[in-house]
Image (cartoon, rainbow, N blue to C red):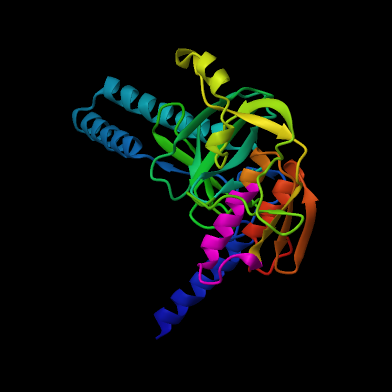
Amino acid sequence: MQPTARAQGFRGWLRRATGAWLPRKGTLDTGEVLLSQRRVFILPSKAGLGFAALSLILLIGSVNYTLGLGFALTFLAVSCALVDMVATYRNLAQLHLRQGRAAPVFAGQEAQFELAIANRTRLARYAIRADFSDVPEPRHVTDVAAGAQASVVLAIPTTARGWLSPPRVKLSTRFPLGLFHAWSYWRPGTRALIYPRPEDGAPSLPLVGNSGSQVRAAGSDDFAGVRNYQAGDSPRQLAWRQIARLDPALGGQLVTKHFEGGEGSDLVLDFDALPASLDLELRLSRMARWVLDAEQRALPYAFRLGALRYEAALGAAHQAACLRALALHGSGEPA
């Protein structure tokens, strides 16, 4: 019982001693982070272990046969290894890390997190590898000149809507000889917003006339010109004369007659108006598709999602607000 208690006491003391300067697992690094000497770890690589074994064999042979040149070669090799250890450590230490912007994406796309690596010393850094810690082999290798800065974009696949927090980022290097492996961890505090994946083959936009009847997106009083064909346009509105003049070899495509005036229409994207039999995620995906279609067709649209109400509008800010509301629906976080 006594050795066990002593072992537990030693583990507790070691945990308390290292916990004062080692970053705890799961702790987010906010703001700019400096890779100080306590955040950089270094160990011999496989090549370094082989080099150490070879140096030991040289030393034993030199002792057995009293070879002066053997001693000189052994000490020279060990000296090079020690210099390489210091150079590998310095290649990673004293770098400044800062998180960049993470742009929103749709579920199924890759979320991209930007990492800015700043080198404010007079020593250039080479072959800095950066990637998420769960990736077996780093996919990004960059050099950072003295007094310069480099950016690395780390991508991770997405499957579900909502906020996505990236895993730990591992930075490592084996420069210059590869005998040692130095690494450090960084946990970015930024998050990426994942929008619902737009539904494929969604029904046409729910355009409703002022009288409550279904109408076209545009009137038919005054001819205003032609525009590119969009999904949902009636075949009777195709501008066949203009289509015949387009050369398919030059990227010709279908065009539609565009009219102004006529009966007005209101576009209201109401989540509660969708069939309740549909799955929740499918309804959110359909709403996301309608938001994109309305923006593409330049149709002002109102947005309703539960108690959330947005008046009819158009533009990037309105689209982002609607997609954000869809992404955070049911999460308890304010849109």
In terms of depth relative to the viewer, which is nearer, 44 or 330?
Answer: 330
Q: Is residue 299 above or below residue 17?
A: above
Left or right: where does residue 309 sit relative to residue 331? right
User: Residue 242's spot in the image, x, y percent?
Assistant: 57, 19
User: Residue 234's spot in the image, x, y percent?
Assistant: 56, 39
Q: Quadrant of residue 308?
A: bottom right
Asked if residue 274 lies in the magenta stretch, the reply is yes
Q: Residue at point 63% right, 34% down?
A: 117
In terms of depth relative to the viewer, which is nearer, 112 or 77?
Answer: 112
User: Residue 26's spot in the image, x, y percent?
Assistant: 58, 60
In terms of depth relative to the viewer, which is nearer, 72 or 80?
Answer: 80
Asked if residue 70 lies in the magenta stretch, the reply is no
User: Residue 109's spot in the image, x, y percent?
Assistant: 51, 45
Q: Residue furthest front?
A: 221
In terms of depth relative to the viewer, which is nearer, 31 or 210?
Answer: 210
Q: Residue at point 73% right, 27% down?
A: 224
Q: Residue at point 56% right, 19% down?
A: 241
Q: Residue furthest bottom?
A: 1
Q: Which residues are magenta?
A: 272-291
Left or right: where does residue 272 sit relative to residue 135? right
Q: Quadrant of the C terminus?
A: bottom right
